[in-house]
Image (tube, coloured by chain):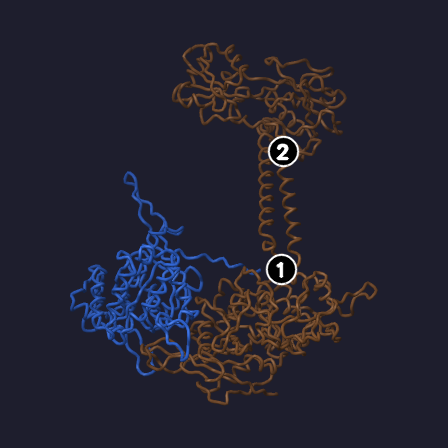
Chain colours: A blue, B brown
């Protein structure tokens, strides 16, 4: 007998938002590896077979195949559960503490082709909305943004330096989203109800790393055995601002202004992110300023490849931040 | 093999080499269809990107140009382009080929043949835009076995439910074999359904898509799952699919006839609720070709143009050139209510009529079944717009075979007719509503209202008759049935425990009992029947003499109707017992002010207690207010969680004397005496005796072995704890009556829209 649809819904929906090639799919693909690299007990588990398949296949492709995922051609949806460490409860009278149930955050992730965020290129003689809002896939994208309360916004500084179209891929969906939220009465205080994790991607690119280094924004986690450079979340906004200065179009600063205008200040957090991280020599096991590039650009008909092991930087952190903030606002049955 | 020339239009989706943008339309044929159509369709039928290319997607498109609707079957071939974008990612080309359906209706071809013809074309084909395609042979394409496998049969049958179907377990199967499978499934449906069938040899399991028949690793949650080479389990719950599968697999149906017949049914048909029954009838007609009526006057008019909606429920609206019909091939979401059937000419060009060769006629038996059901398609409907006014497609008198004619030779089996009738019933809900709605509304409203009134009435009767703890009783004058022991008791609720004890003893002795009540039991007791008479003990003013011929069977201690409770924070049980014995004169006890007899009795028995009357509505109030240390409360009011005084020091107990006649002695022997002697008077104050029925069963059960099957009284009511069960029964009946009344109200207000056909 055929079963009726009955799969459960995730607790919180999170949408990926970024221009084509900004690294949305790669960031998701690196999530499992990033969690496995951490020393805490957070892990990610697929909530349905298809979502588990994605985690397994993408992890294999990155870690073994050393290849990046192809560009998305449809709006993909993954259902995952972040399972955290079990909190230790204080024991009475010196008795051994009994661990509580682990924290669980159910996530529904939307990954859309980056082109859908753009204003679209209308075919000659075409009629309709200037941003292609009549496009069924764009409607689906806006539906996903409306359903979500968490957004991972990817800002690709290399693309911005080359094409300067980050704002082009932001303002149209943002305006449509605000319109929908206003209609549904969730824009009453003039801000969107979403939390937004702004990820400055491709931190492993020498140009981005050098910008951070010149602004003295780099730190090293003393607990990190590889001594990988990082930018603390508090300084990531400054890095973002600094990278906006080299925008090809000069419009990048409007991205920052739009974020401030549409989102609550305490619901914005910046991250300097690299899905593949820096190259680390397996013998020295130390970051080397003279040899840190982990991506090898492909030749004429070759894929770009990942040179060494993946050491994702700030891939998990945006997800955990969003998951925990959303769980705190709307605890679900899965949150313990 | 005959080859046919098929025209097409095309569009190319991809990226330019080195591009930093997303996928877009790169080029297209500049013919009838505009780029908006190509944009719309490529966006609507995106299936994701497979790592294993090429893959093929079958989509559909409908456009309107000068009031003329054009339907296209769209074949999209996705393959690597050999180029890379700005981030060095491989670029995929998706080549969209638009083939007019009317060409395919005139010269049917298979998907696989079309793919082979189009895949070899350049990426940007140049005019003339036409390819040679081998003509369609519906009887081939079923692999080595030559017959459709269980997967294809299941998929075809399930498609006729309106929900999407996803084939899983075919990850390693080559694309071309999957495409042939799509052909095999389509061949099991009327060819006209290809005008609305969307299919794909691969879809992403994590992408939402609008493909009706797809391959994927995991089926979407709203789709039926069919396992490659195995099929699907289809039960009667999947009613339309079950019927169709039965049609497709009947041993008396010749496959070749079926397939050829279906291939000839080229009139466009949707998968919506309006057209699915017709599809099933075409299936049936193709399976039994001998039943095709040749006479024109037996033809029934075929309504056409019923369209499917984006969601399968409403008609689509092909619009002017440049805009595609919205999701014309999208499957129904589960649970979607069927839309009203349309017979307008929206989907077909006005002023045209269906091809004469495609006129659909019902086979006689099926039609008579449908006529009998009053749900025949086209019944009572106006001719389709554009139908010739001379009535060539006008309704005819439904054929009815008379009894003298006997069954038609080669008729469809009755079981099949019933199945088809059931399917019609499922899919013709709207017609049924429009035809019989108001009548059904009144009938259903009255039925529910009657049911509600009846249930409430029964509930009230049960509530009134609830005796507060007595077993069911019969009328005093009734004659006891043979093997029945009459229990003659006083008409007092406080005697319920003793009555239940006797009844339970009788039951465990293997006899029926009948309880009769009267003010003076001794006077009404039958002598000639086995009978037990219960008379108040000597401690009661109501005591009396036993009737003539009765001897005492035992003395049954019975719990008092009241209990004495105390606040252990104010008084210890020892001090309270001392007070009851007259050793402490400072203890205050409250009692309900409605029972002066009880007050007098307590004064006599416990003269040292300081009694304080309190309102009977809240007999524990003084105890809660700590005005008194103890309180006498009715057992039915509950003890409020306070401790009870039990044992011989508590409130004075009562006894009931049980007498039986010789006939009863013969059946009960000394059982009643043994049970009565086992009752501990000291425990009667406990909460265990608050429910007389249960307490009696427990007491008797401790002495006598379990009896036979449940023994009932004359009225057929099972002995039970009436004090509890009757109340619940009454409440349940009243509640059910209320619900039925509410439903009647809703039906009366909402009317026919609330009636749903039974699937």
Foreground residue among B719 and A188: A188
Residue B103 visible to an observer of this rendering: yes
**Chain of the residue displaying label 2:** B
Q: Is residue B134 above or below residue B643?
A: below
Residue at 49% in and 16% down: B649
**Numbered tag placed on residue B583 in the rendering:** none
Q: Position of residue A82 (x, y in %)?
A: 36, 57
What residue is disc 2 on?
Answer: B462
* Residue A94 x/y as whole percent: 27, 40
Residue at the image point whose x is 60% and y is 56% from the top: B756
Q: Viewed as shown, does residue A47 lie left or right of A21?
A: right
In the rendered image, the quadrant that contains the N terminus of chain A is bottom right
Name the residue tied to disc 1.
B429
| Element assignment for label 2 | helix
> Where is B355 relative to A257, above or below?
below
Q: Please, which chain is the residue tagged with disc 1 on?
A: B
Residue B37, percent from left and from top? 47, 77
Q: Residues within 10 Å of mark 1 (few under 14, many from 20)?
A: many
* Residue found at the very far right of the displayed protein: B404
């Amino acid at each position: 007998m055929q079963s009726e649809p009955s799969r459960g819904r995730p607790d919180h929906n999170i949408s990926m938002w970024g221009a084509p090639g900004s690294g949305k799919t790669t960031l998701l693909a690196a999530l499992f590896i990033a969690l496995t690299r951490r020393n805490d007990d957070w892990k990610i588990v697929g909530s349905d077979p298809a979502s588990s398949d994605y985690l397994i296949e993408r992890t294999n492709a990155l870690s073994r195949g050393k290849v990046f995922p192809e560009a998305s051609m449809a709006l993909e949806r993954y259902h995952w559960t972040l399972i955290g460490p079990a909190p230790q409860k204080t024991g009475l009278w010196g008795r051994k503490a009994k661990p509580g149930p682990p924290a669980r955050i159910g996530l529904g992730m939307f990954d859309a082709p980056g082109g859908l965020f753009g204003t679209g290129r209308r075919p000659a003689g075409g009629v309709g909305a200037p941003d292609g809002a009549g496009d069924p896939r764009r409607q689906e994208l806006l539906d996903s943004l409306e359903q979500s309360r968490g957004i991972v916004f990817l800002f690709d500084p290399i693309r911005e330096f080359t094409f300067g179209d980050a704002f082009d891929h932001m303002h149209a969906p943002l305006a449509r989203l605000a319109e929908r939220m206003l209609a549904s009465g969730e824009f009453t205080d003039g801000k969107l109800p979403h939390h937004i994790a702004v990820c400055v991607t491709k931190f492993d690119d020498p140009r981005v790393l050098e910008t951070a280094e010149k602004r003295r924004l780099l730190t090293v986690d003393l607990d990190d055995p590889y001594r990988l450079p990082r930018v603390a979340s508090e300084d990531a906004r400054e890095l973002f601002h600094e990278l906006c200065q080299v925008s090809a179009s000069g419009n990048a600063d409007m991205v920052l202004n739009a974020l401030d205008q549409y989102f609550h200040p305490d619901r914005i957090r910046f991250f300097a992110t690299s899905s593949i991280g820096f190259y680390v020599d397996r013998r020295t096991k130390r970051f080397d300023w003279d040899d840190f590039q982990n991506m090898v650009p492909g030749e004429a008909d070759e894929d770009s490849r990942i040179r060494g092991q993946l050491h994702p930087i700030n891939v998990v952190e945006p997800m955990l931040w969003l998951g925990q903030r959303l769980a705190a606002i709307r605890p679900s049955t899965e949150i313990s | 093999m005959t080859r046919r020339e098929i025209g097409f239009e095309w569009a190319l989706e991809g990226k330019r080499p080195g591009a930093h943008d997303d996928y877009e339309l790169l080029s297209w044929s500049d013919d009838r269809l505009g780029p908006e159509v190509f944009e719309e369709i490529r966006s609507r039928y995106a299936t994701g990107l497979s790592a294993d290319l090429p893959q093929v997607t079958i989509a559909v498109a409908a456009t309107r140009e000068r009031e003329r609707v054009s339907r296209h079957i769209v074949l999209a071939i996705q393959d690597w382009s050999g180029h890379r974008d700005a981030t060095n990612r491989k670029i995929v080309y998706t080549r969209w080929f638009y083939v007019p359906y009317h060409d395919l209706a005139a010269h049917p071809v298979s998907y696989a043949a079309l793919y082979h013809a189009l895949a070899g074309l350049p990426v940007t084909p140049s005019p003339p835009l036409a390819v040679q395609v081998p003509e369609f042979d519906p009887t081939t394409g079923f692999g080595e076995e030559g017959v459709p496998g269980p997967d294809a049969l299941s998929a075809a049958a399930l498609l006729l439910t309106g929900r999407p179907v996803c084939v899983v377990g075919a990850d390693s199967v080559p694309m071309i074999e999957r495409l042939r499978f799509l052909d095999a499934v389509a061949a099991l449906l009327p060819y006209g359904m290809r005008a609305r069938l969307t299919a794909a040899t691969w879809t992403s399991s994590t992408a939402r898509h609008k493909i009706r028949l797809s391959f994927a690793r995991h089926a979407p949650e709203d789709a039926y799952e069919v396992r490659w080479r195995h099929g699907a389990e289809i039960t009667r719950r999947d009613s339309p699919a079950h019927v169709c599968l039965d049609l497709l697999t009947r041993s008396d149906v010749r496959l070749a006839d079926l397939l050829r017949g279906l291939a000839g049914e080229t009139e466009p048909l949707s998968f919506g609720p309006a057209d699915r029954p017709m599809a099933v009838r075409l299936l049936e007609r193709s399976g039994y070709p001998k039943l095709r009526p040749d006479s024109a006057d037996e033809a029934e008019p075929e309504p056409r143009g019923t369209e499917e909606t984006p969601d399968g429920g409403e008609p689509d609206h092909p619009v002017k050139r440049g805009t595609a019909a919205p999701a014309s091939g999208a499957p129904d979401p589960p649970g979607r209510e069927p839309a009203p059937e349309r017979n307008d000419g929206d989907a077909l060009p006005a002023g045209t009529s269906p091809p004469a060769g495609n006129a659909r006629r019902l086979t006689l038996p099926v039609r008579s079944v449908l006529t009998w059901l009053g749900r025949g398609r086209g019944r009572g409907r106006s001719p389709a717009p554009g139908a010739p006014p001379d009535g060539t497609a006008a309704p005819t008198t439904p054929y009815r075979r008379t009894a003298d004619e006997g069954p038609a030779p080669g008729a469809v089996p009755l079981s099949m007719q019933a199945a088809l009738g059931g399917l019609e019933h499922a899919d013709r809900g709207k017609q049924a509503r429009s035809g019989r709605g108001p009548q059904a509304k009144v009938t259903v409203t009255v039925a529910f209202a009657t049911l509600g009134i009846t249930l409430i009435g029964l509930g009230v009767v049960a509530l009134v008759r609830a005796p507060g703890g007595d077993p069911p009783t019969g009328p005093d004058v009734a004659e006891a049935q043979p093997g029945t022991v009459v229990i003659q008791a006083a008409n007092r609720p406080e005697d319920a425990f003793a009555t239940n004890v006797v009844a339970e003893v009788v039951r465990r002795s293997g006899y029926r009992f009948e309880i009769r009540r009267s003010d003076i039991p001794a006077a009404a007791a039958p002598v000639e029947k086995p009978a037990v008479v219960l008379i108040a003990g000597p401690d009661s003013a109501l005591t009396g003499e036993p009737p003539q011929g009765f001897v005492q069977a035992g003395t049954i201690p019975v719990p008092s109707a009241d209990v004495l409770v105390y606040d252990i924070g104010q008084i210890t049980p020892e001090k309270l017992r001392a007070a009851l014995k007259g050793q402490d004169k400072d203890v205050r006890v409250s009692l309900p002010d409605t029972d002066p007899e009880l007050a007098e009795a307590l004064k006599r028995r416990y003269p040292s207690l300081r009694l304080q009357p309190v309102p009977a509505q809240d007999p524990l109030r003084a105890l809660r207010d700590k005005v008194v240390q103890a309180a006498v409360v009715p057992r039915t009011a509950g003890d409020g969680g306070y401790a009870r005084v039990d044992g011989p020091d508590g409130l004075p107990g009562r006894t009931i004397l049980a007498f039986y006649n010789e006939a009863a002695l013969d059946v009960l022997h000394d059982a009643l005496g043994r049970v009565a002697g086992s009752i501990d008077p000291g425990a009667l104050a406990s909460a265990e005796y608050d429910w007389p029925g249960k307490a009696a069963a427990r007491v008797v059960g401790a002495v006598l072995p379990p009896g036979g099957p449940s023994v009932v009284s004359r009225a057929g009511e099972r002995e039970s704890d009436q004090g509890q069960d009757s109340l619940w029964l009454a409440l349940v009946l009243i509640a059910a009556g209320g619900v039925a009344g509410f439903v009647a109200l809703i039906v009366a207000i909402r009317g026919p829209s609330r009636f749903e056909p039974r699937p």
